[in-house]
Image: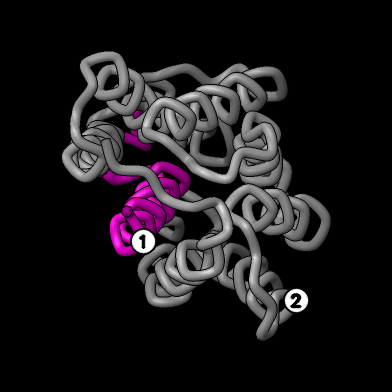
Amino acid sequence: MSVFMNKDGRGILLAMVKGIQDNKQYLGDVDGLIGDGDHGMNMNKGFTLYEEQLGDDETTFSDGLFDLGNVLLTKIGGSMGPIYGTLLMGMSDAEDDEDEITLDLLAKMFEQGLSDLQEIVDAKVGDKTLVDTLAPATESLKKSAAEGKDFKEALEDMKAAAAAGRDSTINLKANFGRAARLGERSRGVLDAGATSCCIIITAMADGIEAVLV
C-alpha cells in the first residue's frame, strides 16, 4: 500500500498555497454574490504570508499544516481565520510524529480537523458552509481507508466528494455568516467557504499524489 513521507511536506503545502493564490479573484467573486467579497483577498493574504514565512526551508506535512493554520488563525482575522486555523492545526495534532503518512493516518487527520472545527462552530452538513465540503471529503477518506483502497484512488474519490459537497451548497439556504441574513435569497450560488475548502483539499490531494511512494 502506498504512503507518503511526512518530510515531503513542502511541495504539498506550496501546492495548497498556489491553489488559493490562483483562485483569489474567483473566491472574491463567489463571496461577493452573497457575502462581502473579501474571502479571496483574505485567504490569499494568509496563504501568501505562510509562503513567505516558509521561504526556502523544508517542512514536514504535519508541521506545515500547523504553521499554516497558525498564520491563518493569527493574521487574517474575521471568521475564516479561526475556522481554517482550527481545522489545519487539528489535522496536524492528529499526526503523532510519524515518518510515513498512510491513508489511514490521513483519514484520522481529517477526522480530527473536522472534530476540532465542530467544537468552535455549530455548522453541520446542509448549513451552506465549508462543512458541506469537508465532511463528505472526510467520510470518503475514512471509507477508503476501511476498505483498503489504493491511496491514489482514495485521493481521487476524496476530491470528487469534496467537489460534490461544494456544488451542493448552490441549492442550500445559508444558516451562518453574513449570507444568513439573506434567508431564501442566499440560494442559487456557491458558498465561498465551501469553495475555498474544495480548492485546498484538491490541491493537497494533488500534492500528495506527486510524492506517493
Q: Position of residue 160 (x, y in %)?
A: 19, 40
Q: Quadrant of residue 43?
A: bottom right
Asked whether residue 188 appears in the rendered view, the answer is no
Front residue of 114/149: it is 149
Q: Position of residue 188 (x, y in %)?
A: 24, 40
The structure residue drawn at horizontal position 50% and vertical position 43%, both measured from the top left corner, is: 100
The structure residue drawn at horizontal position 32% and vertical position 53%, both measured from the top left corner, is: 213
Asked whether residue 99 appears in the rendered view, the answer is yes
Front residue of 168/152: it is 152
Q: Quadrant of residue 172?
A: top left
Can you say whether 204 is above or below 167 in the image?
A: below
Can you say whether 45 is above or below 177 in the image?
A: below
The structure residue drawn at horizontal position 42% and vertical position 35%, both measured from the top left corner, is: 102
State the extent of the magenta-drawn residues as a range: 184-213
Q: Residues within 10 Å of mark 1 (few under 14, many from 20)?
A: some
Residue beneath disc 1: 211
Please, what secondary structure does the residue beneath circle 2 have?
helix
Q: Which mark is residue 53?
A: 2
Residue sitting farthest toward the right = 74
Q: Residues within 10 Å of mark 2 (few under 14, many from 20)?
A: few
